[in-house]
Amino acid sequence: MNKTQRVPMKALVLSGGKGSRLRPITHTSAKQLIPIANKPILFYGLEAIARAGIREVGIIVGDTAAEIRAAVGDGSAFGFKATYIPQEAPLGLAHAVKISKEFMGESPFLMFLGDNLLKGELSPLVEDFLQTKPNSQILVAQVPNPSSFGVVELKDGKVSRLVEKPKEPKSDLALVGVYLFDKNIFTAIDHIQPSARGELEITDAIQWLVDQKFTVVCKRTQGWWKDTGKLADLLEANRLIHETLEPSIHKDAHVDAGSRLEGRVTLEAGAIIESSIIRGPAVIGARSRIIHSYVGPYSSIYYDTLIENSEIEHSIVLEHAKIRDIKRIQDSLIGQRVELLRSGAKPQAYRIMVGDSSRIEIP
């Protein structure tokens, strides 16, 4: 599909979740805006939607609506028109679809979970849906822990049953957060009831379509897929995206004679590297300063940060964070405006101030 071709389809992007598994980071910021290789997670999906030719996008927002609006704006930067649809509470994926009915009208649409990352394009899925015209098309991937996801069971190659987070899954095919629907999904949602957890489940709505003999087709993802709701998956997604990056040094970045860049390194505008080693793949954000330090592979250092007399590897550091005199950090997510420093105060002790749901590992 031509990148600029307009398709008769809309998109619905869910960005209203609370991100409870990534607290305390998500106490103060939207999980969909956590940067992966210095780009918010949400932007990867929005860019893929635009490349698929979709020009009208509804974005479901909740408590972090102001942040999402500020980041995405009217959508013109991505090449589409954004419409914001408030969801008063996280009442389920099917509830998010239900409240988008007026926006969708009669249009078929693609639904995308804003905290998911996929390798590959959405264009083939959109094109296939428009050509074959099923009532629903769902994307799945094989996973080792299907009880954590909505699971699809197949019979003779056709969708027979969908179960949301089954205790004893009969399939390892998980829904990956990409769905295509025609207007019949709204009828399906009108016929389901909230689940035991009080939510309208999209799996129940799709099951209604299956039971009523509507056409529901299942496609397997051809690349990797990451639900970035947990730290380990977030860091793995960061690693996978880093593998796709080419080195790039902005003309306004500065690297002094005492520093070394090794491998695929990206330096954004105003980044300053002094007496340090940056070993890629790694991204150093705009106006960030790395002084007498080592930044190792698969590290994403966001904008306006300071790392001094420290070592860090395989980690994500958010904006305005400061790390001083820390011997070694790895496999970590450092939040906005966090300060990590070694104290010379006596008596020697760990002096820690952390928020709710934090995790700290001390050797």
Image (cartoon, rainbow, N blue to C red):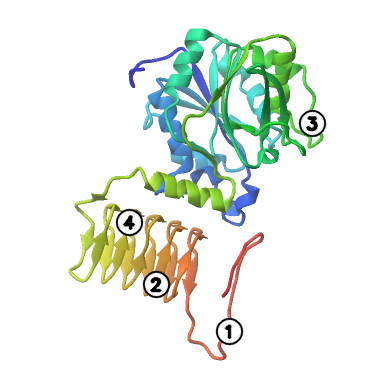
| Nearer mark to the viewer, of 4 and 1 | 4
User: In terms of sequence position, does the residue under pointer 3 or pointer 4 come before the other?
Assistant: 3
Distance in Å between CA atoms under marks 1 and 2? 19 Å
Quadrant showing the N terminus: top left
Mark 2–mark 4 distance (CA, rounded to whole Å): 17 Å
Residue 91 horizontal/vertical position (percent): 71, 33
Alpha carbon distance from label 4 to label 1: 34 Å
Q: Is residue 178 above or below residue 297?
A: above
Query: Which residue does the numbered mark 4 point to in the structure image?
Result: 280
- Residue 310's disc is 2
- Amino acid at pointer 2: Ser
Q: Can residue 144 be seen from the camera position used here?
A: yes
Q: Earlier in the sequence, mark 3 or mark 2?
A: 3
Q: Which residue is mark 1?
A: 349
Q: Is residue 265 left or right of residue 171?
A: left
Q: Residue furthest bottom?
A: 346
Asked whether the residues under the numbered discs 3 and 2 touch, taking CB atoms below 8 Å apart as contact, a structural biologist would say: no
